[in-house]
Amino acid sequence: MKEQPILQVQKLSKQYGKGCSHCQEGTAQLEKNFCPICKTVYACRDISFELYRGEILGIVGESGSGKSTLMKSLYFDEPITRGVGLLADFENGTANIFEQSRQQQRLIRNTILGMVYQNPMLGLNMEFSSMSNIAEKQIAAGNRHVHNMEQRSLELLEHVNIPLFRSKEAPKNFSGGMQQRVQIAKALSNNPPVLLLDEVTTGLDLSVQADVLDLIKSIQRELNISMIVVSHDLAVIRMLADRTIVMLNGQIIEHGLTDQVLEDPQHAYTQQLVYSLL
Ligand SMILES: Nc1ncnc2c1ncn2[C@@H]1O[C@H](COP(=O)(O)OP(=O)(O)OP(=O)(O)O)[C@@H](O)[C@H]1O
């Protein structure tokens, strides 16, 4: 029997703008990702993929290709235009998560998903202590036991190599790499089966970047979490992802095992990306 994906996305589309008689036709010619007539932006167009238990799925593409929009959509930061999302851990994968009430979506977010943003300001409260940041996510997931939350926060901070004597300090005092580590600890605090990571190493020094990537890889191995890792940098994807999706102008133009995509890129854009690695 075929393994059930932990997440299945079918024909997810997100547009900014109402569209017009020209672009509403599925076959209309767009200029990159927008309608030349009404300027509606088609940030994600008919995106479909599966994520399996314990795998890391990489999404790579240039700036503006729709990667962040896809992540924001999956984390309910933004409503989608249309599409289906099925999570094996929600109603046994039979209910479209995008059609649930805000309350249900909050529940899914708090119990099934974790998110690490490129900008730590989006994922952390910079004024609260690192421990309180982690506790916040645990409270949202229904945890009320202060001692347990404290223990869990310390355990997670240790896991992501934050010195424990700094656990009561606010992330605003931390370096970029440390802030990303706290964000990762927070995202893991409710043991989510699915972790979303959006350009988490962009803007960090190369050595710090390597540390954060190592941390992600070791977490995935130890906890067997499924991850979607978004990056414009194919080197990051090469290091982390089992399978890779390549996006361009809001569409998936290529997908396959990462090794396969790297060794035998089919689309001219992917070929360009791969050659730039050499
Ligand atoms: N709120 C918005 N209103 C209008 N257009 C938007 C909005 N948010 C994103 N877009 C457009 O959607 C497209 C996809 O953007 P998105 O941020 O998802 O790309 P990306 O691949 O993540 O790039 P980057 O890494 O630079 O953020 C872009 O053309 C962008 O300008």
Image (cartoon, grey):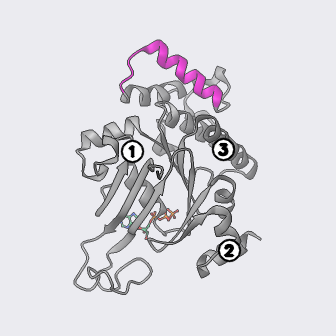
Magenta stretch holds residue 266: no
- The answer for how far apart the CA atoms under marks 2 and 3 are is 24 Å
The amino acid on which the numbered mark 1 sits, given as a three-letter code, is: Ala
* Mark 3 within 8 Å of ligand 1, using the beta carbon: no
Q: Position of residue 154 (x, y in %)?
A: 58, 21
**Neighbour class for label 3 at 10 Å: few (<14), some, many (≥20)?**
some
Q: Give the total of numbered labels.
A: 3
Where residue 24 sits, quadrant-wise, is: bottom left
- The answer for how far apart the CA atoms under marks 1 and 3 are is 23 Å
Q: Position of residue 124 (x, y in %)?
A: 48, 38
Residue drawn where x is 70% and y is 44% of the image: 214
Q: Which mark is residue 88?
A: 1
Does the CB distance between marks 2 and 1 fall below 8 Å? Answer: no
- Most common secondary structure along the magenta stretch: helix
Mark 2 secondary-structure assignment = loop
The nearer-to-camera label among 1 and 3 is 1
**Which image quarter holds the C terminus?**
bottom right
Mark 3 secondary-structure assignment = helix
Residue nearest the viewer, comparing 117 with 188: 188
The amino acid on which the numbered mark 2 sits, given as a three-letter code, is: Asp
* Mark 1 within 8 Å of ligand 1, using the beta carbon: no
The residue pinned by badge 2 equals: 264
Q: Position of residue 79 (x, y in %)?
A: 30, 56
**Neighbour class for label 1 at 10 Å: few (<14), some, many (≥20)?**
some
Evaluate whether residue 77 shows in this view: no
Q: Earlier in the sequence, mark 2 or mark 1?
A: 1
The residue pinned by badge 3 equals: 217
Q: Earlier in the sequence, mark 2 or mark 3?
A: 3
Residue drawn where x is 39% and y is 58% of the image: 9
User: Vertically, is 270 above or below 29?
Assistant: above
Magenta stretch holds residue 144: yes
Residue drawn where x is 27% and y is 82% of the image: 25
